[in-house]
Image (cartoon, rainbow, N blue to C red):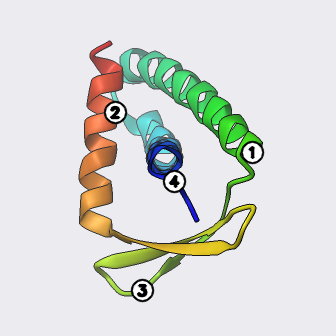
Amino acid sequence: MIKADERQLLHKYLLLELAVKSLQIDYKKTEQFKMKIVFQPLMDTLLKDLRQELFNLKQQLAQLRIRVVGWQPVDEYFSDVQVATAGNDVVLRYANQALKTQVEKLLINQINK
C-alpha cells in the first residue's frame, strides 16, 4: 500500500520521467532549428536540472522501497503504471491527457525558475 505522501513523490517522479523522455525526443529535432544555438543550451540546462531532480526522487523512492516496474497503455486515453512496493505490487491508472498537461506545467514552472 502506498501512503499519500509516497504517492505524491511517485507522481512527481513519473512526471519528471515523462518530461525528460519528451525533452530528449524533442532535443534531437533542435538540430534542424535555424536558432539552435539559442535553444540547445536552454534545453541542456533544463535536461540537466530535471535529470538531477529525477535521480534524487528515485533515491528517495528506493529508500521507501518503491520502484516503477513499467508503463502499459490501456487504450488511447489511459495508461497503467505498475509499482513495486515493500508490501505488494500496485497498479495505478493515469489519464494520458492529464499527464501531458501536468508535464507541460512542470516544464513551464522549471523554465520560469
Q: Quickly name the residue at label 1.
A: 62
SS type, badge 3:
loop
SS type, badge 2:
helix
Tell which circle, 3 or 4, labels the residue nearer the N-terminal end. Answer: 4
Q: Nearer the viewer, mark 3 or mark 1?
A: 1
Label 1 amino acid?
A: Ala
Label 4 amino acid?
A: Lys
SS type, badge 1:
helix
Label 2 amino acid?
A: Leu
Tell which circle, 3 or 1, labels the residue nearer the N-terminal end. Answer: 1
Q: Quickly name the residue at label 3.
A: 74
Q: Residue at x 58, y 73 (%)?
A: 90
Q: Residues within 10 Å of mark 4 (few under 14, many from 20)?
A: few
Left-right relation of 60 to 80: right
- Residue 107's tag is 2
Measured Cα–Cα span from mark 4 to mark 1:
15 Å
Measured Cα–Cα span from mark 4 to mark 2:
26 Å
Q: Residues within 10 Å of mark 1 (few under 14, many from 20)?
A: few
Label 3 amino acid?
A: Val
Q: Quickly name the residue at label 4.
A: 3
Q: Residue at x 27, y 29 (%)?
A: 108
Residue 18: percent from left, percent from top:
47, 51
SS type, badge 4:
loop
- Residue 70's tag is none
Tell which circle, 1 or 2, labels the residue nearer the N-terminal end. Answer: 1
Measured Cα–Cα span from mark 3 to mark 4:
25 Å
